Amino acid sequence: MWASIACAALFVHLNCFGLVIASPWNPQAVKRPLPQFPGPHDPQKPVIGREKCGVDDVDRVPCGEPGIDTAQCAAINCCFDGQQCYYGKTVTVQCTIDGQFVLVVARDTTLPRLSLDSISLLGGSDAPCSAVDSNADFAIYQFPVTACGTRAMELGDHVVYENKMSSSYEVEVGPLGAITRDSHYELYFQCRYADAAVAALAVQLSSSNPPMPVAASGPLRVELRLGSGQCVTKGCVQAQAAYASYYSDADYPVTKVLREPVYVEVRILGRTDPNIALVLGRCWATSSSHPFSTPQWDLLVDGCPYQHDHYLTTPVPVDGSSGLQFPSHYKRFVLKMFTFVNPASMAPLQEKVFIHCSTSVCQLTAADSCEPRCTRQRRDVATAGRGSSHKLTVVSSGEVIFVRP
């Protein structure tokens, strides 16, 4: 287990802010020369997390010396419940007076959760840069400020030691594009030493500004829209409640975090014939409003979930229990939010997606339900499309933006 922390100081991060003055550690004790580096990164404004301290008792990692009080606990960026000081659901950086970084990483720092096994420092992820302790929800790192690729610089009367923590992410590659649904997190952190103070600083890398909203509507009389309803009663089924209301044009761009469900509905407009059915051919996503631009990622192929996606799109049945007058005029499905990835560099691209579907109208008969046969090796919707009274129509959503929570 790691040693108790004697001091921690200025900490700017998503969730906390504080200042403590401690006994000095003499930076001259560092034997390696101080190379010249660019100036340290500027801190962002701290954002207070509403659920930072909501850690289950069994998963808590103690913070500070035994007997620490509320003020002392807050000063080292930790949580206090009246009896215990513990680390919160964030990344906490602390500096010791003997020249050690202490980095405590919570998997709930991001949505979706960080993969603690994927974390690395500038010097890699092997000892002494690997976690010294961990549980299911936290990974704890402790290493000298001169190790693990740390960069040293002189800044006025301070000696500054800076490192970077980052998490890796899994990329899925398709024939027309690549995506990821994993969180990617990068954090610069510092220890600053002077004659009378020790300070710690953490700066999350800022994301790019969100793009301007762009609306895209399908031709003819077919509409694609996104459900916005939420469960508000006990026992409610979210996949049903989501379609109780919809995002309007004024709501776009819609923002989602990675892996958050996106509820899609496609419907026929202006028809009252109960003997026709809407058929979805291919549904896919692009990073621009143009449906045939690249990159692309398939969601449905011949009306069936794209089988090479690790998070399969889920069709939502629409029948008489839906309360709709013409349920066969509707198709619904749920996808998990993702962002496109450059297949060459494996870096996330613009953090937005547009959803498109090719549609047709099928004549319902006793022999043909117009439903895709997704259990067959070769999916067959051709017979369903033969009774179509319209040419193939492509309909699109407005812009959906991936945001970091």
Image (cartoon, rainbow, N blue to C red):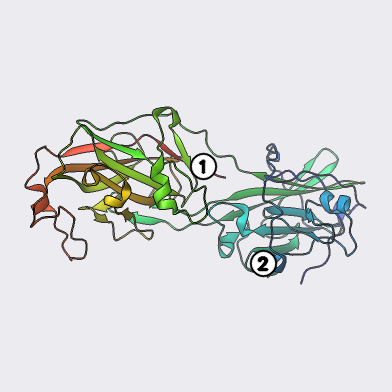
What residue sits 52% from the left and 47% below the top?
232
Towards the viewer: 214 or 280: 280
For label 1, count other residues whose C-alpha is less than 10 Å away and answer few (under 14), some (14-19) or many (20+): some
Residue kind at label 1, given as amino acid type? Val
143 to 254, vertically: above or below: below
Whether residue 124 sits left or right of residue 239 in the image: it is: right
For label 2, count other residues whose C-alpha is less than 10 Å away and answer few (under 14), some (14-19) or many (20+): many
- The answer to whether residue 305 is visible is yes
Q: Which image quadrant for residue 376?
A: bottom left
Q: Which image quadrant for residue 313?
A: bottom left
Towards the viewer: 381 or 107: 381
258 to 126, vertically: above or below: above
- The answer to whether residue 337 is visible is no
Q: In which quarter of the image is the C terminus?
A: top right
What residue sits 71% from the left and 58% below the top?
103
Residue kind at label 2, given as amino acid type? Ala
What residue sits 23% from the left and 48% below the top?
282
Q: Mark 1 points at which residue?
A: 403
Towards the viewer: 59 or 103: 59
State the image coordinates of residue 59 (x, y, percent, origin top left): 69, 66
Q: Are marks 1 and 2 in contact (CB under 8 Å)?
A: no
**SS at circle 2:** loop
Query: Which marked residue is nearer to the observer: mark 1 or mark 2?
Result: 1
Q: Name the residue under label 2.
A: 131
State the image coordinates of residue 398 (x, y, percent, origin top left): 36, 34
**SS at circle 1:** loop
State the image coordinates of residue 375 (x, y, percent, origin top left): 21, 65
Along the polypeptide, which appears first: circle 1 or circle 2? 2
* CA–CA distance in space, label 1 to label 2: 28 Å
Q: Quadrant of the N terminus?
A: bottom right
Whether residue 32 sits left or right of residue 125 in the image: it is: right
